[in-house]
Image: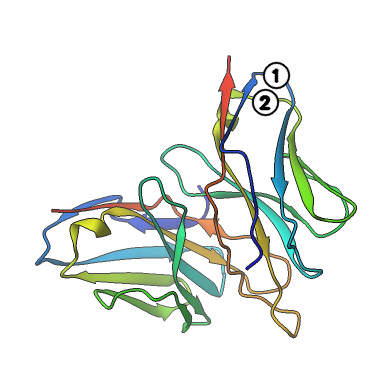
Amino acid sequence: ETGVTQTPRHLVMGMTNKKSLKCEQHLGHNAMYWYKQSAKKPLELMFVYNFKEQTENNSVPSRFSPECPNSSHLFLHLHTLQPEDSALYLCASSQPGTIFEQYFGPGTRLTVT
Amino acid sequence: DAKTTQPNSMESNEEEPVHLPCNHSTISGTDYIHWYRQLPSQGPEYVIHGLTSNVNNRMASLAIAEDRKSSTLILHRATLRDAAVYYCILRGVIAGGTSYGKLTFGQGTILTVHP
């Protein structure tokens, strides 16, 4: 257990559906991240939040909409996804500072049909 | 971001030491060297990090070349549980000394441990 939980662990959705991924951290961190891991590709950073403010959007399509209501929770709202969006979506958290480490959740395996 | 180069895969036998190399010839003076690993069906986990000096922790050791252009992650006695993808990552520091910790992952090295 890393202290970062993600729900659901598996999700199958159609291209016209709307769904949300949830991430929660119990570590008292103030930075949270969404990453995407597609088959055969490196992890790609999608979004970064520091103290609930979005500080990085790595050119992510608007069909992915993040939300960070407080420092402990992070959501990724999904709508009108494409089959190529099927991937493992990982959430992480860290304490901002010069020396830190990121703690990752187990991920949500998303399949878009 | 400065790039790292790692072998695609390595193999080891259980109970033997493993040396995982990483080249980072364009590293800047303020870049930290981080290592993460990802076990099957899990998210990545932090292993170790360093700046200039060699580092040891309960999981591994990190040996950093004097010119900082390469580093080696050392697992002193590999176990089957160490089979994973190992990522060597450079993390810079934003002006002012703080960083929210953007990590850029490469392909990593797939470590296979044989019983």
Q: Split into 4 quadrants, where in the image is the N terminus of chain B?
A: bottom right
Q: Give amino acid for label 1.
A: Glu
Q: Are marks 2 and 1 in contact (CB under 8 Å)?
A: yes
* Position in image of residue A50 (x %, y %): 53, 80
* Position in image of residue B12 (x %, y %): 64, 22
Instruction: Report the coloring of the rendering.
Output: rainbow
Chain for disc number 1: B
Give me the disc on residue B108.
Answer: none
In the image, what residue occupies the spot 65% across and 18% down?
B14
Q: Give amino acid for label 2.
A: Ala
* Position in image of residue A98 (x %, y %): 73, 72
Question: Which residue is the site of mark 2?
Answer: B78
In the image, what residue occupies the spot 73% across and 66% down?
A99
* Horizontal side of residue B74 vs A101, given as left or right: right
Q: Secondary structure at mark 1?
A: loop
Mark 2: few, some, or many residues within 10 Å (few <14, many ≥20)? many
Give the answer, above or below, for where B82 lies relative to B49.
above
Task: Please state which of residues B13 and A92 is positioned toward the viewer in this rendering.
Answer: B13
Inter-mark Cα distance, 2 to 1: 5 Å
Q: Secondary structure at mark 2?
A: loop
Give the answer, above or below, for where B41 lies relative to A78.
above
* Horizontal side of residue B61 vs A113, given as left or right: right
* Horizontal side of residue A88 vs A29, given as left or right: left
Question: Which residue is the site of mark 1?
Answer: B15
Residue B83: name its quadrant.
top right
Mark 1: few, some, or many residues within 10 Å (few <14, many ≥20)? some
Q: Split into 4 quadrants, where in the image is the C terminus of chain B?
A: top right
Give the answer, above or below, for where B40 lies relative to A61.
above
In the image, what residue occupies the spot 74% across and 25% down?
B17
